[in-house]
Image: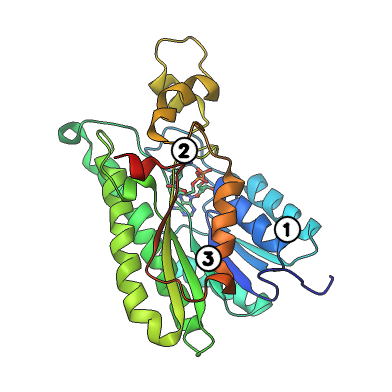
C-alpha cells in the first residue's frame, strides 16, 4: 500500500451499484486519485427487469481494479431497498476504512418502456423502491457517520430524465425527478454540517443498462441482431453534441470533481453530463 496522492487522497467513498457500469468506473476513478472505496451492489437480477443484473464476479472485478491501483476496497452484497442490510454493509466498510467522506448513491435500474396507463403497478413500485427510496436509504445510513463536523460530499445519481419528461418512461422519470427533490432538501438540511449534496444527470452512457440485447431489440425491431451502434442512431438525437453515447469515464470525471475539495462551495447543484440533452428540451 503506497501513501495516497491525488485529488481525493485520504478520502473514503461509499458507492452503491459499484459492481459494474458507472459505479465501477467511479470506484476506479476515485481510487486513481487516492480514495479508498466501500463498494456495495445487489449482484443479482432484479425481478421484472428485462436485462441481466450484475454478478458476484463483477463486484470482485471492481475490487481487483481498485486494488491494482494500490488502494483499499471493502465490498459487500446489499440491496438498497433493504435498509438494515445496507446499514450493515456500510458499517463493515467503516470498520476497516473509516467513515465515508464521499457518498455516491448510484445503484439503479432502468424499466421497460410502457404507456403510463398500461404500466404494471409492480413495475412502478420496483422502480420507486430502488431508484428513489434506495437513494434515500443510502443517504440515511451514511449521514449519521458524517455529522462529526468534518463535512463531506454526497452525490445522488439521477438522469437527464430527472430534469425533463420521458414518454413511456413515467416510472423512471418520476423516480429520477424525486432524486432532485431529495438532493435540494438534503443540501439545505446538511449545509450547517459542511456536507454538500449535489445530483448528476447522465445522458446516454455506455453501460450494461443500455448496452444489452433487450434494449437494442426494443429500439431496433427492424434489425435481426441490433448492436449498440444501431441503437445509438435512435437515442443519439437526445444529445446536442454529435456524440450519441458517452463513456462512463466522462461521468466519473464529474463525480471526481464533486467528490473533491475543488468543488468545496458547490452544493444544491444538478449537474447534467449529457452532451446537452437537457438543454435541448
Ligand atoms: P448498470 O446496470 O450497469 O449498473 C447499475 C448497478 O446498480 C448494477 O451493478 C446493479 O447490480 C446495481 N443495482 C441495481 N439494483 C440494485 C439494488 N436494488 N441494490 C443494490 N445495487 C443495485 O447501469 P449504469 O448505467 O451504470 O447505472 C448507474 C446509474 O446511472 C443508475 O442510477 C442509472 O439509472 C443511472 N443512469 C444511467 C444512464 C445510462 O445511459 N446508462 C443514464 C442516466 C442515468
Q: Which residue is mark 3?
A: 258
Give SS at disc 2. loop
- Mark 2 to mark 3 CA distance (whole Å): 20 Å
- In the rendered image, which quarter contains the C terminus? top left
Q: Is residue 141 left or right of residue 41?
A: left
Q: Which of the 4 quarters of the picture holds residue 73? A: bottom right
| Mark 3 residue CB less than 8 A from any atom of ligand 1 | no
Height in image: 58 above or below 28? above
Give SS at disc 3. helix
Crowdedness of circle 1 by 10 Å Cα count: few (<14), some, many (20+)?
A: many
Residue that sits furthest to the right in the current view: 2
Q: Which residue is mark 2?
A: 204
Q: Is residue 60 left or right of residue 165?
A: right
Height in image: 90 above or below 240? below
The answer to whether any part of residue 20 appears in the image is no
* Residue displayed at 38% across by 53% down: 130
- Mark 1 to mark 2 CA distance (whole Å): 25 Å
Q: Which of the 4 quarters of the picture holds residue 18? A: bottom right
Return the residue nearer the eye: 176 or 279: 279
Residue that sits furthest to the left in the current view: 117
Q: Which residue is mark 1?
A: 66
Q: Residue 144: x percent and y percent?
A: 45, 82
Crowdedness of circle 3 by 10 Å Cα count: few (<14), some, many (20+)?
A: many
- Mark 1 to mark 3 CA distance (whole Å): 20 Å
The answer to whether any part of residue 118 appears in the image is yes
Mark toward the start of the polypeptide (1 vs 3): 1
* Residue displayed at 25% across by 42% down: 165
Q: Nearer the viewer, mark 1 or mark 3?
A: 3
Give SS at disc 1. helix
Amino acid at each position: 500500500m503506497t501513501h495516497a496522492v491525488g485529488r481525493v487522497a485520504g478520502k473514503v467513498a461509499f458507492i452503491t451499484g459499484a459492481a459494474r457500469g458507472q459505479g465501477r468506473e467511479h470506484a476506479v476513478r476515485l481510487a486513481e486519485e487516492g480514495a479508498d472505496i466501500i463498494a456495495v451492489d445487489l449482484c443479482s437480477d432484479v425481478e421484472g427487469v428485462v436485462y441481466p443484473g450484475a454478478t458476484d464476479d463483477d463486484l470482485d472485478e471492481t475490487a481487483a481494479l481498485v486494488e491494482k491501483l494500490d488502494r483499499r476496497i471493502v465490498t459487500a452484497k446489499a440491496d438498497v431497498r433493504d435498509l438494515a442490510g445496507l446499514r450493515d454493509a456500510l458499517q463493515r466498510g467503516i470498520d476497516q476504512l473509516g467513515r465515508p467522506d464521499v457518498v455516491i448513491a448510484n445503484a439503479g435500474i432502468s424499466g421497460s418502456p410502457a404507456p403510463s396507463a398500461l404500466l404494471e403497478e409492480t413495475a412502478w413500485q420496483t422502480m420507486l423502491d430502488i431508484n428513489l427510496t434506495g437513494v434515500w436509504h443510502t443517504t440515511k445510513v451514511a449521514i449519521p457517520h458524517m455529522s462529526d463536523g468534518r463535512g463531506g460530499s454526497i452525490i445522488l445519481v439521477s438522469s437527464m430524465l430527472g430534469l425533463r419528461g420521458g414518454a413511456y418512461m413515467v416510472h423512471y422519470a418520476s423516480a429520477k425527478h424525486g432524486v432532485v427533490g431529495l438532493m435540494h432538501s438534503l443540501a439545505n438540511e446538511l449545509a450547517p454540517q459542511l456536507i454538500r449534496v449535489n445530483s448528476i444527470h447522465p445522458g446516454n452512457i455506455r453501460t450494461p443498462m443500455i448496452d444489452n440485447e433487450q434494449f437494442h431489440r426494443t429500439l431496433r425491431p427492424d434489425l435481426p441482431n441490433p448492436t449498440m451502434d444501431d441503437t445509438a442512431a435512435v437515442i443519439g438525437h437526445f444529445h446536442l453534441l454529435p456524440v450519441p453515447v458517452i463513456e462512463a469515464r466522462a461521468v466519473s470525471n464529474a463525480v471526481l470533481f464533486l467528490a473533491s475539495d475543488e468543488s468545496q462551495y458547490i452544493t444544491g447543484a444538478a449537474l447534467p453530463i449529457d452532451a446537452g440533452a437537457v438543454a435541448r428540451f
